[in-house]
Amino acid sequence: MRVPVTCMLASIVLALLLTGCATTPPPPRAGSPTTDADAGYFLSWSQKGQLIGSGLIRDSQNRTYDIWIVPGYVVPSQRLAKYLGRTGDDFAEYVGREKYRDLADNSGHCFDWAYDDCLNHFVVRGVPHAWGDYMRAAGARTDKRVFGWWSAYPWAVMEGTVDTVVRIPLGLAGTALGTVAGVAIVPGFHAVYSTVEGTAEFGAGVVVGPFATYAWNTIIAPPMALVGQKPAPERVDGYWVTMKTPQEQVLDQQHHAPPRPATREEIVALTQWGTTLLQESRALDARRQEAQRERQALIQAAEARWRTNQDVIAREERARCGQAAAAPEMRGALEQLRQHGYDQERTAAAFADVERNLRACSVSASDIYRIRNLLRQYPPSAVTNPPPIAVREKTDPLQTSLQVIENMPQHTPKER
């Protein structure tokens, strides 16, 4: 009993579909074009094939409708061919010269770093340079006869010894690491990189991606081709369904078409035109260079004036801030802040509360930003006290040794 019922239902559905192909569409809306693309509801057999094969539908006016969720079989096949070619290019790198040229360049950089930077620059030249710095500092202290001057040279010897003891192992370790990288790591990377990249391209671009698209198109395209309505310009939303007119299709094909090779006559004409341009331009080279020199001179003069003006403005700003700090209405408040230790650090820590207070007073964001910078530059302690003498923490040989290690790059010659 079930089989006849199923056959009957299938016959009814098929009859409805065939009948629908011959139905007339509803009257077009005002302003919409009336073409035979609107004749009937269901897609024609050729349009069904277009939808399943490429995800595109063409009407009788040769307008193309792109259905977003129907990828077709053409696009994933093109993607498969593209990634298959890229996979071949990846593995073809093993027989090309570019890979081995890159390998030689990168290995050469490793050797440069190992032997020039680490061994020669950091160790061979760095050790005497650092000792020279420490001894010159000891000589200056001895010449001035500063308190304890007689310990300046022993202290310099201690600094130089610590520097040497740390510098030589670091430099030799860097030399060894650079050598290993140049001999083994870089060649090993270049040996496996093309294989890994080619395998990834093959797996994602040739196997997984296209066949996942094939599977989705196999699921979605046939039912849409079976029951989908014929597209028309007024039923295009620009996202789910997009449309290109024949003129747009021609322009798109011209845009994406590879340029044809230049003919011999075109090459000769371009060569002649390029030579003519060179001759005409060369006559102006002297004037162009002179204009460049004038430009540089003007830029340098403008920068010099700008620096001078900035210095003048900064001095005037400091003077005006000092006068404002000495005003009777501000002196008491600033003195109270100074007594509570409002130096630059504490002023910056309190600025979040100050900013909230400024906002409550309807101060603009740009003015708040400017006030933040001014408070950082002129905290209460800076405008009420003389400039403080820099205080250095007490030291001992261990602390100085750690400082020597931290400042080691400063005692390395910079010139190569």
Image: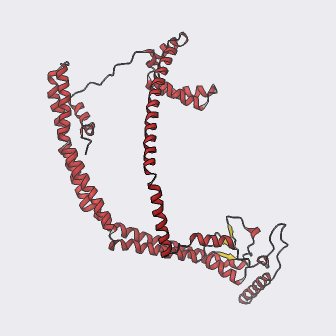
Q: Position of residue 68 (x, y in %)?
A: 64, 69
Q: Nearer the viewer, residue 228 or 296?
A: 296
Look at the image and tell me whether residue 262 can be seen. no
> Compared with residue 315, is residue 290 higher up or lower down, i.e. above or below?
below
Q: Is residue 375 left or right of residue 39?
A: left
Q: Quadrant of residue 43?
A: bottom right
Q: Position of residue 335 (x, y in %)?
A: 48, 13
User: Residue shown at 25%/54% (left/top)?
Assistant: 112
Q: Is residue 388 left or right of residue 66?
A: left
**Quadrant including the N terminus:** bottom right
Q: Position of residue 95 (x, y in %)?
A: 33, 74
> Compared with residue 312, is residue 159 higher up or lower down, i.e. above or below?
below
User: Residue shown at 77%/68% (left/top)?
Assistant: 234
Q: Nearer the viewer, residue 191 or 113?
A: 113
User: Residue shown at 84%/73% (left/top)?
Assistant: 26
> Compared with residue 400, is residue 80 higher up or lower down, i.e. above or below?
below
Q: Nearer the viewer, residue 167 or 396?
A: 167
Look at the image and tell me whether residue 155 can be seen. yes
